[in-house]
Image (cartoon, helix red, strand yellow):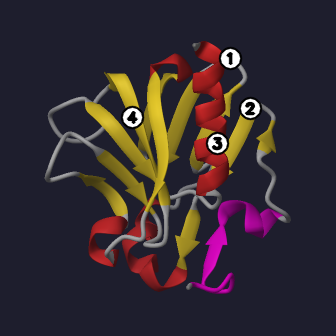
């Protein structure tokens, strides 16, 4: 188990974590310090993490990369992990399918499935799934699932 000293979120530097931002619910990434050489090049300014906007959009930012889709395109979300550290960190494509990962830690993340797929961020194909390693994966999965229930 990783201690809180070993991990930090972008919001930790600015005080307590605040999942309510001015444009919707914001879920910052959880950064595992021991893996800093792998994620540090992607820790840019701005809201790095996932935002569920008030106007019904899913936005994930990771350094220069951005995955965006209407929340109505989300088909499923589930907590996953732990991961092998060498496959968990960085912007990564899956070797098995067209999935994409925005990874900052090896502990846990949320795998979000889209239909239609999210427009390609890296690689040659659009992405039917995106895994994000946010600080509170249970809360993000619950928020996405709540949105699925209200859209039925």
Q: Secondary structure at mark 3?
A: helix
| Residue drawn at (44%, 27%) of the image | 75
Range of residues picked out in magenta: 2-14
Residue tagged 3: 142
Report the quarter where the N terminus lies.
bottom right
Label 2 neighbourhood size at 10 Å, few (<14), some (14-19), many (20+)?
some
- In the image, taking residue 125 as reference, residue 71 lies left or right, namely right
Contact flag, marks 2 and 1 (Cβ < 8 Å): yes
Q: Is residue 102 above or below residue 82?
A: above
Residue tagged 1: 55
- In the image, taking residue 147 as reference, residue 78 lies left or right, namely left
Residue 24 coordinates in the image, percent (x, y): 74, 32
Residue 81 coordinates in the image, percent (x, y): 42, 65
Which of labels 3 and 1 is toward the front?
Answer: 3
- In the image, taking residue 23 as reference, residue 42 lies left or right, namely left
Mark nearer the N terminus (1 vs 4): 1
Q: Is residue 8 magenta?
A: yes
Q: CA distance from mark 2 to mark 1?
A: 8 Å
Contact flag, marks 4 and 2 (Cβ < 8 Å): no
Q: Secondary structure at mark 2?
A: strand
Contact flag, marks 2 and 3 (Cβ < 8 Å): no
Contact flag, marks 3 and 4 (Cβ < 8 Å): no
Label 1 neighbourhood size at 10 Å, few (<14), some (14-19), many (20+)?
few
Mark linked to residue 113: 4
Q: CA distance from mark 1 to mark 4?
A: 20 Å
In the image, farthest residue toward the right = 15
Mark nearer the N terminus (3 vs 1): 1
| Residue drawn at (14%, 34%) of the image | 124
* Residue 91 position by quadrant: bottom left
Report the quarter where the C terminus lies.
top right
Mark nearer the N terminus (4 vs 2): 2
């Amino acid at each position: 188990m990783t201690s809180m000293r070993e991990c930090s979120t972008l919001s930790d530097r600015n005080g307590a974590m605040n999942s309510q931002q001015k444009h919707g619910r914001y879920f910052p990434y959880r950064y595992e310090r021991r893996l800093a050489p792998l994620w540090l090049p992607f820790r840019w300014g701005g809201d790095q993490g996932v935002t569920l906007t008030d106007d019904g959009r899913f936005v994930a930012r990771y350094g220069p990369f951005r995955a965006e889709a209407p929340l109505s395109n989300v088909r499923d979300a589930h907590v996953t992990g732990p991961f092998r550290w060498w496959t968990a960190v960085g912007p990564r494509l899956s070797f098995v399918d067209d999935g994409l990962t925005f990874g900052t830690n090896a502990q846990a993340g949320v795998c979000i499935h889209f239909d239609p797929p999210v427009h390609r961020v890296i690689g040659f194909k659009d992405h039917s799934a995106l895994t994000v390693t946010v600080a509170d994966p249970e809360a993000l999965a619950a928020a996405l699932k709540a949105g699925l229930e209200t859209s039925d």
